[in-house]
């Protein structure tokens, strides 16, 4: 049987539902494919904005990469289509929404929940590295939660989110590893660094190298002159100025894992497969992910 002809989707194939979120390049809607009644998330990108930001090639590359990725912890990109003015991405719908909202609501996660998320992200990253895809942007804003509570990496590409996503106006620097701050070439080990930052933020509710100046005076300064944001965060990153606050109480096993991931020399970072054997993960992560 000849390979199924790639279906040409059109907007008429979908019933459009409520808005799910919005990024810089466009909005995301709940949608139902009429023939199959399959629920999806439909991301609408404006061609004009893509052209202005010269990200068409980045989008084409991302669509190409995503169409070959199949993993329970990576949000599916089922397909895309376009009309005169817009490009539409047909995405898997994550029924339990955005992880960053859940983290803001709970302040921080239990060690079992944090370990379960970290283990599932490690498995997704091992899968990506196996396909020579690195640097899946794994900060909380890019993570969604599926119907069974499982984590889904949903690279939002270049879409910049409304600033209220994080306490600071400007895009967060918190997740940059030292080699990217010092802009030397980076490899898959950047993802181990970012996963370490994420693990810390899951357990403490704040990223490890955040500039302390989140006082009101600093905030007003930042709002008024965001481009002059003191790069205390960058200094703390390149010095790996890692401190564990006394509250909330976190096990020494968790701190040990984080300390093995947030290592300046990228070749010394704990490899992802070794992470899955770390006692804290073995004792706390729910195997189902
Ligand atoms: C595989 O997921 C993507 C793949 C690609 C791109 C993208 O825009 N790439 C891109 C855009 C412009 C330029 C270059 C790349 C975006 C996503 N994903 C998203 O935007 C997530 C939309 S929000 C959402 N989605 C599902 N369920 C929910 N409950 C929610 Br809320």
Image (cartoon, rainbow, N blue to C red):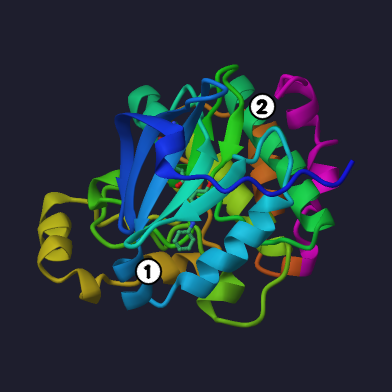
Q: Please say whether residue 198 is visible from this viewpoint.
A: yes
Q: Residues within 10 Å of mark 2 (few under 14, many from 20)?
A: many
Q: Identify the image quadrant of the C terminus.
A: top right
Outermost residue toward the front in this view? 1
Residue 171, by quadrant, is bottom left
Ligand 1 within 8 angstroms of badge 1 C-beta = yes
Instruction: Choose the circle earlier in sequence order: 2 or 1.
Output: 1
Task: Look at the image and say whether residue 18 sits in the magenta stretch.
Answer: no
- Residue 168 x, y percent position in the rendering: 26, 55
Mark 2 vs mark 1: give the one in front: 1
Q: Secondary structure at mark 2?
A: helix
Q: Which residue is mark 2?
A: 116
Count of number-bearing discs? 2
Residue 149, by quadrant, is top right
Q: Is residue 25 left or right of residue 202?
A: left
Camera-nearest residue between 198 and 259: 198
Camera-nearest residue between 171 and 235: 171
Q: Residue at x 80, y 30 (%)?
A: 279
Q: Which residue is mark 1?
A: 50
């Amino acid at each position: 049987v000849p390979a199924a002809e790639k279906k040409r989707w059109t907007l008429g194939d979908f019933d459009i539902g409520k808005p799910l979120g919005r990024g810089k390049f466009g909005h995301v809607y709940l949608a139902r494919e009429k023939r199959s009644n399959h629920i999806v998330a439909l991301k609408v990108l404006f061609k004009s904005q893509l052209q202005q930001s010269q990200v068409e090639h980045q989008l084409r590359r991302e669509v190409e990469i995503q169409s070959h990725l199949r993993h329970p912890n990576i949000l599916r990109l089922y397909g895309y289509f376009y009309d005169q003015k817009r490009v539409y991405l047909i995405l898997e719908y994550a029924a339990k929404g955005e992880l960053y909202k859940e983290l803001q609501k709970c302040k921080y996660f239990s060690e079992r929940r944090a370990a379960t998320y970290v283990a599932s992200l490690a498995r997704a990253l091992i899968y990506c590295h196996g396909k020579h895809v690195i640097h899946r942007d794994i900060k909380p804003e890019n993570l969604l939660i599926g119907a069974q509570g499982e984590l889904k990496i949903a690279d939002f590409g270049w879409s910049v989110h409304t600033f209220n996503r994080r306490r600071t106006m400007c895009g967060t620097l918190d997740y940059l590893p030292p080699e990217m701050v010092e802009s030397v070439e980076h490899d898959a080990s950047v993802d181990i660094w970012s996963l370490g930052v994420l693990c810390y933020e899951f357990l403490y509710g704040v990223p490890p190298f955040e500039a302390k100046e989140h006082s009101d005076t600093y905030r007003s300064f930042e709002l008024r002159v965001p481009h002059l944001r003191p790069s205390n965060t960058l200094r703390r990153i390149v010095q790996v100025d890692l401190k564990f606050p006394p509250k909330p109480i976190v096990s020494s096993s968790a701190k040990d894992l984080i300390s093995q991931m947030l290592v300046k020399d990228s070749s010394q970072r704990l490899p992802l497969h070794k992470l899955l054997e770390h006692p804290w993960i073995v004792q706390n992560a729910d195997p189902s992910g």
